[in-house]
Image (cartoon, rainbow, N blue to C red):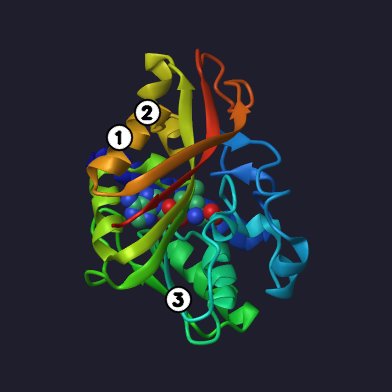
């Protein structure tokens, strides 16, 4: 598990450096990098006006959907983004929960946190905080947030049950989980499942929809709904010997 986490961290440290240098290394690409899924992810989910209003572009996203739309945020709410990357979803959430609300992002990669803080300064958003930590041990107290969002990150965790339990713990009763993630829709080849590059590229760590649904329920959530959106063949995912298929999905649930 530690090997996976170190490999994921190193992948996203490099990605953050490229995003910072090129400004726009990862346009239209989920997760970034050569073994990542590529496709028009996010183009139709995000409003370009909203992104440019923050002084950012879609290149600030390594996601596979837009959980900020899924969650229907309201002024005054507290939001947490698991694996906040360059910070786009945190900054959009911060705008939506203003006035009175706050958006937190948690990420384990220093280079991503630095980029997120630069993007926060560029956007002039004050009600957002980026925390260093893992999504398996979130640095927030119990029942601290109204909404947990996440965009293309939970598939990267080796222990998904631990992540979902943490999401449940930090939510207030009645709180909402709104996640965009990748899922496995056909069995991937063992060579793909064991590739650390494919894991960091949001492919190898994917699990089937029914396993995802069970993990969300086992964490204590109710009204669990998973909607598969875009499907990607192994070629699009840059995996020459991938025998299966992956898809992006929206996952919604509520804490009783
Ligand atoms: C594919 S990127 C997605 C970033 C962001 N959510 C977005 O939509 O642009 C994955 C991010 O999750 C972070 N990450 C991956 N696994 C993590 C973990 N176990 N704990 C904390 N952060 C993690 C990485 O550092 C990286 O910034």
Residue linked to disc 1: 214
At a point 51% along the width and 59% down the height, the residue shown is 71
Q: Is residue 199 above or below residue 169?
A: above
Dot 1 or dot 3, earlier in sequence: 3
Q: Which mark is residue 77?
A: 3
Answer left or right for 189 relative to 71. left
Q: Which residue is tagged 2?
A: 210
Q: What residue is at 53 percent from the left and 85 percent from the top?
A: 126
Badge count: 3
Instruction: Name the residue at 59% across, 69% down.
Output: 92
**Quadrant of res 51:** bottom right
Residue 230 screen position, x and y as percent: 62, 33
Which quadrant is the N terminus positioned in? top left
Q: Nearer the viewer, residue 103 or 223?
A: 223
Instruction: Tell me residue 45's x, y (percent).
Output: 68, 51
SS state under label 2: helix
**Helix, strand or loop status at disc 1:** helix
Q: Return the residue found at the far right.
A: 49
Residue drawn 47% across the image and 38% down it = 226
Q: Quadrant of residue 95?
A: bottom right
Q: CA distance from mark 1 to mark 3?
A: 28 Å
Q: Tag 2: Cα neighbours inside 10 Å, few (<14), some, or many (≥20)?
A: few
Q: Is residue 84 visible?
A: yes
* CB-based contact (under 8 Å), mark 1 and mark 3: no
What is the secondary structure assignment of the residue under circle 3? loop
Residues at circles 1 and 2 in contact by the CB criterion of under 8 Å: yes
> Could you tell me residue 62's position as x and y percent?
57, 50
Nearest the eye: 50 or 218:
218
Q: Quadrant of residue 96?
A: bottom right
């Amino acid at each position: 598990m530690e090997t996976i986490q170190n490999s994921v961290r190193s992948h996203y440290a490099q990605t953050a450096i490229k995003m910072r240098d090129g400004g726009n290394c990862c346009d239209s690409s989920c997760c970034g990098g050569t073994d990542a899924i590529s496709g028009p992810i996010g183009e139709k989910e995000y409003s370009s006006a909203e992104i440019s209003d923050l002084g950012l572009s879609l290149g600030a996203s390594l996601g596979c959907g837009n959980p900020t739309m899924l969650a229907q945020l309201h002024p005054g709410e507290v939001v947490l983004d698991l694996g906040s990357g360059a910070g786009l979803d945190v900054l959009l959430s911060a705008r939506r929960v203003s006035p009175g609300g706050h958006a937190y992002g948690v990420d384990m990669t220093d280079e991503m946190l630095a980029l997120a803080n630069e993007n926060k300064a560029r956007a002039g958003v004050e009600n957002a905080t980026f925390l260093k930590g893992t999504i398996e041990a979130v640095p927030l107290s119990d029942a601290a947030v109204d909404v947990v969002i996440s965009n293309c990150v939970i598939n990267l965790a080796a222990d998904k049950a631990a992540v979902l339990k943490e999401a449940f713990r930090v939510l207030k009763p009645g709180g909402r989980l709104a996640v965009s993630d990748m899922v496995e829709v056909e069995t991937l080849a063992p060579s793909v499942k064991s590739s650390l590059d494919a894991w960091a590229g949001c492919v190898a760590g994917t699990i089937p929809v029914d396993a995802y649904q069970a993990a969300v329920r086992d964490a204590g959530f109710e009204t669990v709904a998973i909607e598969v959106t875009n499907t990607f063949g192994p070629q699009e995912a840059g995996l020459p010997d991938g025998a299966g298929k992956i898809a992006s999905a929206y996952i919604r649930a509520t804490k009783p």
